[in-house]
Amino acid sequence: MEPVFALLHMVMAILTFSRANETACSLQGEPVYPQLSKDGDIIVGGIFPFHSSWEIRDLSYVAMPPSLKCMSLDFRAFQYSQSLIFAIEEINNSSSLLPGVTLGYKIYDTCSSMARGVKVAMALINGNDNMAQDEVCTKPDQVQAIIGDTASSPCMAIAKSIGPFSFPIISHYATCECLSDKKKYPSFLRTIPSDYHQSRALAEMVKHFGWTWVGALRTDDDYGNSGMATFTKVAEQLGVCLEYSLPFFRTYSQEKMLRIVEQIKSSTSQVIVAFLAHWDLEILLDVFHEHNITGYQWVGTEGWISDSAVAALDKHKILQGAIGLAIPKTKVTGLKDFILDIYPLKSAGSEIFTKFWEALFKCKYTAQNNSGDSTMCTGKEKLSDVENTFTDMSLLPIFSNVYKGVFAVAHTLHDLLGCTKRCPTKKQPDPLTFLEHLKMVHFKTKDGEEVYFDKNGDPAAKYEIINWQTSKEHQHEFVTVGLYDSSFPPQYRLTVNMTSIMWAKKNNQVPVSVCTESCPPGTRKAVQKGKPICCFDCIPCAEGEISNITDSITCEQCYQDYWSSPHRDECVKKETEYLSYDEIMGILLTTISIVGALMTVIIAIVFFRYKNTPIVKANNSELSFLLLFSLALCFLCSLTFIGQPSEWSCMLRHTAFGITFVLCISCVLGKTIVVLMAFRATLPGSNAMKWFGPPQQRLSVLAFTLIQVLICVIWLTTSPPFPFKNLKHYKEKIILECHLGSSLGFWAVLGYIGFLALLCFILAFLARKLPDNFNEAKFITFSMLIFCAVWITFIPAYVSSPGKFTVAVEIFAILASSFALLFCIFLPKCYLILLKPEKNSKRHMMGKVTSKSS
C-alpha cells in the first residue's frame, strides 16, 4: 500500500504544478519537517529511518488517511546523522575546502516507509512553504544533494521521483545492483559497492570452500531479490547449485514462516547463504531456535555479517561460525568520538533528541508518560553507563560512507564555485551541472582514502571476509579472515586465511555441502536426469580414455601410442611387443638356429674330410656342399626374424628366407634329377648323364634361384616390407611387426618355394625304389614330405597367430623344414661314414648294385 500512497502524492504534486499559470503553487497534505537541521549558505539533505516501523492506518480511501505514526526508534539513524553532522562541521571549520561558504543540513525521518521517503525527498527539494499569489511556481532547490536512504527499495522510490529533476542522491548503504542502471536512476550515486560485486564475491567464496550444494534465504525486496538473482547466476557459472532459494519479509505470516522452516529441515545442504537485512534476520533467529534449526554454516552479506545487534540477539549460537562479506574497516579520525558525543544532536533538534535520550537511557522526562517500571530522566545520565546499539561502533565503515558522501558534495561545490583562498560566490549551482561534476569528483580523505565514482555511480568494490568467532569471555567477535578486491584479476581477487577460520561444526572442520561427492580421477560426471548439475553419477572412463582431475565432465582419449592406466587416471605408454632376443622364446629359437647352423658346418666338415670316399662321391659331392651351404644360410636367416623390426631387417628377412630356401630346394631338386639320370645311365645304351652333367646341374640351380631373386627384386622395388605398429590386434599394447607391403609379392615367394618343393617331392617319389647304395631318393622323398607338411601347416597358423607368435611360427617352419632336409639327407650318410666305414667302399657299393639289378 505504501507505493500507492506515494503515487497519490506524486499525482497531486503534478496536478498542482500543471495549474501554475492559473494559481500559485500550494502545498497538498500535511507538511513534513526535518528532525535535525542547521542553517547554512548551501544545505545538504539527509534521509534516514529514525524509526523502524509505523502504526498501521486505515487506508480505505474514503477519507483522508491519518498522519503516519512512527514507532520503534532506531539508534543507527542517529549514528548516520552524527556522521553527516561531523562531516559538515569539519568542512565548515576547514580553511582549504569551501572557504567562506558554510554548509547546513536538513535531516528527515523516513520511518522505514517508501512513501514517506518520497514525501520527505520532495520536501527537501521544494520546501514546505506555500507560494505567494503572484509568484511564479518555480524556485531553486532547497538543498544541494541528499545523503541517504539506508535501504535499496526506498532509494529506488526516491531516485525515480527526483531523478527527472537531475537532483543527486548519495546512499551510504543501498547496495541493490539495480540502482546502477543510469537510465532508470540517472541521479543516484553511492559510497558503498553494488551487490553485483558482493553477489559475485559470495559465489566465488562459496566455490572456494568447495560448497556446491547450498540453500539460500533472501529479503523479499529489491535488495534481496536482485542480489540473490546475481548470486544464483554467478553460482551456476561456477558449478554451485541452489537446493532452495526462499524469500522472507518481516511482515510474513506464521504460515509462510513454517514453510521456510520445513524446507530447511527437509534439505540436505549444510550451508545457507543469507541475503537478508538485519531486522529480517532478527525475526528469523527466534523462529529457528523454536524449531531447532542449528548446526548450519551461514554465509552472510554486509547487511548483517558485521552487525553487533544481530550478534547480540543470537543467544543460542545459531549463527556461530558464520562467514561473509563486510565493508572494509576505514579510519576517519575523530568520527567515533563525535558520534558518541550526543550533545550536537540536542542543538540540531530538541524534539527528536528528547525521544532519543529516553530510549537511550530507558527513562522518562515527564510524569504523565512515566510508567511504573521506568525511571525519571535527570539529564545527567552518562553514555559510558549503557551498552546498546548506539554505543556499538561495528558499523563504523558505513558511518564513514556517510562522511565520504558529504565530502564528495563539498569537493564538487569547491570546484564549481571556483574556490581558491576564498569562494568568489555562494550561489547554489543548478542540479544538472552539479550532478555531472559530482559524477567526476575524485579526491582523498584526510586519512588518505581515495573516493571516486565509476560510470554507474558506484565506488570500487572491496570487502573484508568476516568470521563470527567466540572469545574466551563467550562474546561474539568479528574476525577478518580474508579480503576480496574486484579490481584485481579474477584469480587474485579472493584471498582467505583458512587456518584462522572458526567453522560452525563442533570439530571445526570445513563443512561439506555437496549433492554428490566429487568424482575422483578416472571417472566423469553424468548429470542425473531431472536434477541440478551438482547432482550426478560418477561413470568410470572407458578403456583408452582418462580423466586426471576431480569432477571431470568428460574423459579424454589417449594418443595412439598410449593407453589408459588401470585406474583410468593417466595415459601410459603402450607396451610394445615383438619377438626379442631377451625373452625365453627368442633365446630358444636363436639357440636352435645356431645349433642347426653348427650341425650343418660339422656335417660339411665331415663330408669334406671324406670327400674321396665312395659314399660322398656317389651322392654328388658338389651339390651336397652347395646344399649344406644353403641349409646353413636357412638356419641363420631365421635370426633376422628376431629383434625389433627395422626397415632393413623387414626387407632382409623375407627376401633372404625366400632366396636361401629356393637355393636349398634347387640343390635337392638337382640331386633328385641326378639320381634319376644316374639310374638311367646304368641301363644298356643310355646316355642320359651327358645331358645332366655338372655344368647342367650348376646351371639348373642358378636358374631356379635367379627366378626367386627376380621375384624378390620386383617385390622390393614395387612395395617392399616395412616396419609397422599394429594397434588393432591389442588395444592395450603395440605389436611391432613387418608389414608385407605387397601381399602378392610375399605369396609369390612362398608359392615359388612350394612349387619347387612339390616338383622335388614328385621326382623323389618316382625314384624312391631305386638302389639304396648310390641314390638318396627315399630320404629326399621323406624330407620333402616333412617340408611340405610343415609349410602347408604354416599357412593357417601364420594367418591366425597374434603378434610375436606370427614371427615365431614362421621361424619354426624355417627351422623344422631345414632340420628335415639336414637330418633326412645327411645323417644316414654320416652314420655310414663315421660308424660303418666298412660299408663306405666301392666293392660294397657295387656289390649292392649288382644284387639289386639281378
Image: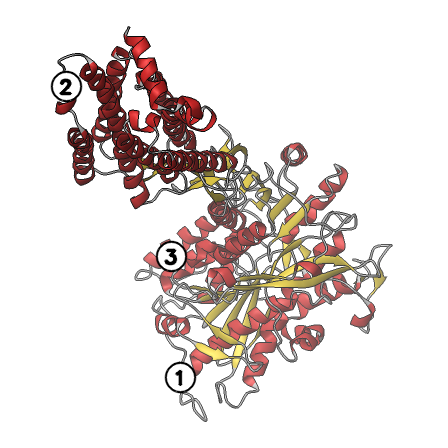
Residue receiving disc 2: 688
Q: Is residue 595 above or below residue 483?
A: above
Q: Amino acid at mark 2?
A: Ala
Which type of secondary structure does the marked residue at label 1 adopt? Answer: loop
Q: Earlier in the sequence, mark 1 or mark 2?
A: 1
Residue receiving disc 1: 417
Q: Which residue is depicted at the point 70% across and 54% down?
A: 310
Q: CA distance from mark 1 to mark 2?
A: 139 Å
Which numbered mark, 1 or 2, is in the foreground of this view? 2
Q: Amino acid at mark 3?
A: Thr
Measured as percent of width and height from the top left, residue 128 is found at 49, 65
Q: CA distance from mark 3 to mark 1?
A: 34 Å
Which type of secondary structure does the marked residue at label 2 adopt? Answer: helix
Q: Which residue is depicted at the point 51% across and 45% down?
A: 548
Task: In the displayed orientation, state which residue is furthest to the top.
Answer: 854
Measured as percent of width and height from the top left, residue 451 is found at 49, 74
Q: Which mark is residue 16?
A: 3
